[in-house]
Amino acid sequence: MWALFVKEVNGFFSSLTGYVVIGVFLVLLGLIMWVFPGYSILEYSYATLDQLFSIAPVIFLFLIPAVCMRTFAEERQTGTLEILFTKPLSNADIILGKFFGAVFLVLIALLPTVIYYYTIWQLGSPQGNVDSGEVIGSYIGLFLLASIFVAIAMYASVLSSNQIVAFLVAIFLCFLVYWGFDFISTLPVFVGTSDHFIQQLGIEYHYQSISRGAIDSRDVLYFISVIGLFLMLTHYQLIEQKRK
């Protein structure tokens, strides 16, 4: 698994893929948080990073599928997936190696945003007037959310050898799991009965909960469970690929 992890990371940074993803993510965040009217931190009367944690999931919704669409689709397209099957690697090794490789790229993309926290710390009046607990919780929530998107995008990638199809399916599934349940809960048939339960099935509910700064074990368990679910679905799909 470690060798495959290193291979995936090297693959990201030996081409423009990794640099483009990190660059696009940081440039978009920077423009929205510091330049665009209505969102700029400089227009707010108090120090907060709420913009970062509300905008980042939307950017990840497109960037992560763009990165992960190649994980299995490209392997199938070029025939190298069959070569992987001949190596002394289990399905779990292949899946986790690729998963942690993509998650590592997300972590590298998030690390430079710590400078935004330092900037807000300096701009606060008095200096340091920032809810650090909320910021830390939001970072943990954002990282876990991105990890779910990676797991979903990998599952979409293993479904098709066409990278564009994998990209579109991944966006749809990420949107459905993040916002879809919240929209479904507003349907009249569920309002007042099971709407709260349906909201709890979506990522947004738990992301907002953990972003308040209180790390609830139920929220963490939810993120781990959804990641595990999509990795298991990827595992079963790989078994089907081996049979074929």
Image (cartoon, helix red, strand yellow):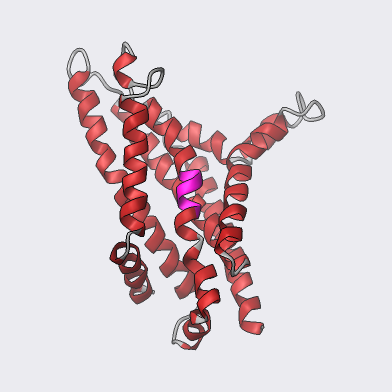
Q: Residue at x 36, y 44 (%)?
A: 24
Q: Is residue 197 visible?
A: no
Please identify the quarter of the rendering in which residue 131 is found.
top left
Nearest to the observer: residue 233 or residue 214: 233
Q: Is residue 62 magenta?
A: yes
Left or right: 190 in relation to 127: right
Nearest to the observer: residue 159 or residue 131: 159
Q: Residue at x 39, y 26 (%)?
A: 50
The relative height of residue 142 versus residue 32 in the rendered view (above or below) is below
Q: Quadrant of the N terminus?
A: bottom left
Left or right: 162 in relation to 126: right
The relative height of residue 157 versus residue 131 in the rendered view (above or below) is below
Numbered range of the magenta stretch: 60-65
Task: Please give the count of numbered marks on the rendered protein.
Answer: 0
Q: Position of residue 126 (x, y in %)?
A: 18, 13
Q: Position of residue 86 (x, y in %)?
A: 49, 88
The relative height of residue 49 versus residue 46 in the rendered view (above or below) is below
The relative height of residue 171 versus residue 80 in the rendered view (above or below) is above
Please identify the quarter of the rendering in which residue 182 is found.
top right
Q: Is residue 166 visible?
A: yes
Q: Residue at x 40, y 45 (%)?
A: 143
Q: Residue at x 63, y 44 (%)?
A: 176
Q: Is residue 13 magenta?
A: no
Nearest to the observer: residue 71 or residue 136: 71
Q: Quadrant of the C terminus?
A: bottom right
Q: Of helix, strand and loop, which mostly describes the magenta segment?
A: helix
